[in-house]
Amino acid sequence: MTLLNLNYKKLFVSVLTVALVSCTNSWEDRENNGDANLSVTLNEAISNTASVSQFGQLLVQTGYDKVLAASKTYTVFVPTNEAMSQVDGTILNNPETLKKFVENHIALTTFSSIRTKDKEKIKMLGDKYLTFSGSTLIDDATIIDADHYAKNGVYHIINKALTPKLNIWQYINSQSGSSAMSAYLLSLKDSNIYDSDATAKANAVPGALSDSLTNSYLKNVYNLNNEKNSYTLFLMENSGYALEVNKMKPYLNQTTVEQTTVFASYFTVRDMAFPNAYELNQLPATLTSRFGVEFPVDKTQIVGQPIHLSNGIVYIMKKVDVSLGKRLLTTKIEGEKNNDYIGTRTPILYRDKVDPAGVFFNDIMVQTPARAKFTLLYYAKDVMYSTKYRVSWRAINDRPGTFQQQLAIGGNVDLTANPIAVVNPTTLFPLITVPANNYTEVFIGEFTITYAGNRDLISLIGGTATTSALTLDYLKFEPVLK
């Protein structure tokens, strides 16, 4: 028995030893690989490597030799002398651009070439992120000699310098003199599409990233100034851009020609940006914007090569052709998402229901309101177009008997009236009887909007009896093409 226990203990120690060895990573293994650089700092190791001496000199020139001699751990992607000979002299001869250039080759913490992720965005010491792909690619440079460990980090030798690229928003700024679409995107710093835009601009703190709040496009669509994420932007040439904007003008009518152009342009360009950087061979036939608009990707209209930037890709397009049927989105308002009511809270029920087909839905029911014309108030979260709308609702009456309700668009709430009521609506639909247990959508009528914009008062009004109930699953406003 003693002999058996002894053999078992030996076996356990052997297995444990193998397990511990298997769990070590490349950074830990550096201590046993015989590399003489393990006794020197990254700065010393790079400076002593003849094939990268030019970059070593830049470390001294910018003061980053002292940074790479400190106790923190770093990863340095070091371009060869041959790669350095290809760098634009205007970058190297300007102290500010030179500093950014050097920073773009250094990351805090260690990144070995032995990787578990196919792609990873890593933060450099500057404001840029680079993509480490597989074990050999950092951005568009190839690692030709990997995993040189020093006592405070690791460096990889690469075949191309990592010159900082513009991000998409910086590129748009650079094109504003020749690109009408770029100039418009920048102009949205001074234009408000939504009321919340003005509030954001008023409260924005000045600084390098202030555009993220003070430009209506960056705030409401995608922040193309954000280095952390990746995007694809389709930037139209001037003639194609004008065609798309003019197509939208009849549906974004405002009180002035200038404002009509501002709104038509916004509802054109907001569907031109997408999350993720799509390489040319990855572009699908259709992309869907964050607003639900289907964007057909016609590769035959792409001018030149994709423009690779620090946070994504820009495609220059001769034109795009998004059909009005795809552009003009239906507005749907969920019944349970009312923003206010006229009456008391007591009779309002927010319900979780299942219809006869077994489909789950939420709705709102006002039972025995104890006042006539109990009113639920809604608003359209997005701009509604200047065109005719067909209006429908689904209203589930699962209580005994029937009741009536009606829809009002516009007007205002008269707080001085007794009782308080919605007055002077621009459109008042007639009272409609809500039958029992009807789960189908019901068409209730049409109305026309003259000026596109927010509809911040949409009212569902109960019948004239104090016991008249209200119910709503959703409202649907479908724009009609002219």
Image: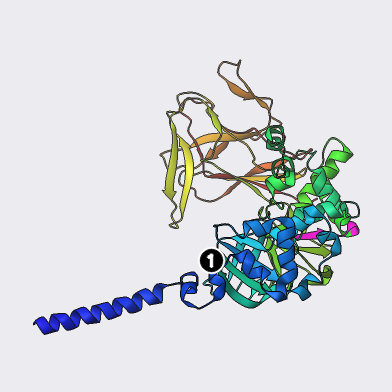
**Secondary structure mostly taken by the magenta-highlighted segment of the chain:** strand
User: Position of 321 compared to 46: left or right?
Assistant: right
Q: Does the magenta run of residues contain 238?
A: yes
Q: Determine whether 168 is above or below 253 in the image.
A: below
Name the residue: 49% across, 48% down: 438
SS at badge 1 = loop
In-front residue for pair 54/208: 54
- Residue bounds of the magenta highlight: 232-239
Residue marked by disc 1: 151
* Residue lying at 84% horizontally and 35% vertically, measured from the top left: 255
- Of 296 and 171, the residue lying toward us: 171
Q: Amino acid at mark 1?
A: Lys
Q: How many marks?
A: 1
Location of residue 232 (image quadrant)? bottom right
Q: Residue furthest left?
A: 1
Q: Is residue 272 visible?
A: no
Residue at figure coordinates x 24%, y 82% from the top left: 11
State which quarter of the image contains the N terminus. Answer: bottom left
Above or below residue 18? Residue 416 is above
- The crowd level at tag 1 (other Cα within 10 Å; few <14, some 14-19, many 20+) is some
